[in-house]
Image (tube, rainbow, N blue to C red):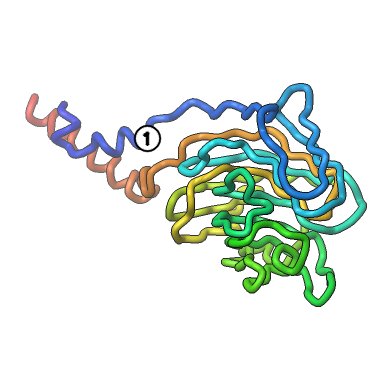
Amino acid sequence: MNLVKLGLPVALAAMSTTAAAALVDLSSWTAQGGSSNWQVAADKNSVLQSVNGNPTVFFSGSNDRGNVLSGKIRVQTTSDDDFIGFVLGYKSGDASAASTDFILIDWKQATQVNGNCTGKVGLAISRVAQGLADGSGTWCHDPAKGVTELARGTTLGSTGWADNTEYLFDLVFTATNIQVKVDGTTELNVNGSFADGSFGFYNYSQQSVRYSAITEDVAPPTNSVPEPGVLALLGIGLLAGIGGVRRRKA
């Protein structure tokens, strides 16, 4: 039987499995920004940021656009209630640069007033145009200070992270789309134009945060895997094709 004549090669290719992504070696990553202490574990697969300080990032230094990034995050303390998260499209020096274009994904445990503005509890995604200064830009997502909020989490937009709780995250980072899943639930799905650059971890005024088991793989093409209903129809077509071949042989 000729599967090409049945019109199924693309579907069958999409159904093929791929090898699991390897763990990322964090020993070559770089810390930038405010006071921090990023301690890479001996196995090179996890890092602990132990300092309560100004905004800081720990980034790969590679071009991570076009990838899926996954791993775990856990705040290993009951002290404080501030920001943890990630950066995407980050370039070396962006933490203190006057002009930038990268994405900040931050998650705050509790609402808190700082100066004349309020940092809101919950998970959000923002575009950063003026670096990561200690102030209303990063604390309150103030567009006038270069941090413009794009969206808040579907279920975690007003819910903070819990102490001593491990969360699984998956981030899809492409030139036109960013998706963030927490424990398998899609929290953020934002379309736009996103600059090239690195994936990294982010802390602001929150100590004892561990990132671990980080993996990176190439993001699949959009709509590369047929929906279950499509697969069912393809299966029916395949069976019909096989039946036709058998009848012709009879």
Name the residue rendered at 82%, 47% in the picture.
Answer: 35
In the depicted structure, whether residue 80 falls above or below residue 244: below
Is 231 displayed left or right of 42 in the figure? left
* Location of residue 102 in the rendering, given as x and y in whole percent from the top left corner: 57, 54
Tag 1 secondary structure: loop
* Location of residue 187 in the rendering, given as x and y in whole percent from the top left corner: 60, 58
Name the residue rendered at 38%, 48% in the picture.
Answer: 222
In the depicted structure, whether residue 204 falls above or below residue 140: above
Q: Nearer the viewer, residue 29 or 93?
A: 93
Residue placed under numbered mark 1 in the picture: 15
Is 63 displayed left or right of 229 in the figure? right
* Location of residue 105 in the rendering, given as x and y in whole percent from the top left corner: 64, 55
Q: Nearer the viewer, residue 51 or 222?
A: 51
Is 11 displayed left or right of 131 in the figure? left
- Which quarter of the picture shows residue 142? bottom right
Mark 1: which amino acid?
A: Met
Name the residue rendered at 92%, 52% in the picture.
Answer: 79
Q: Badge 1: how crowded within 10 Å, few (<14), some, or many (20+)?
A: few
Q: Where the N terminus falls, by quadrant?
A: top left
* Location of residue 213 in the rendering, given as x and y in whole percent from the top left corner: 68, 33
- The single residue placed furthest to the front in the displayed view is 98
In the depicted structure, whether residue 163 falls above or below residue 63: below
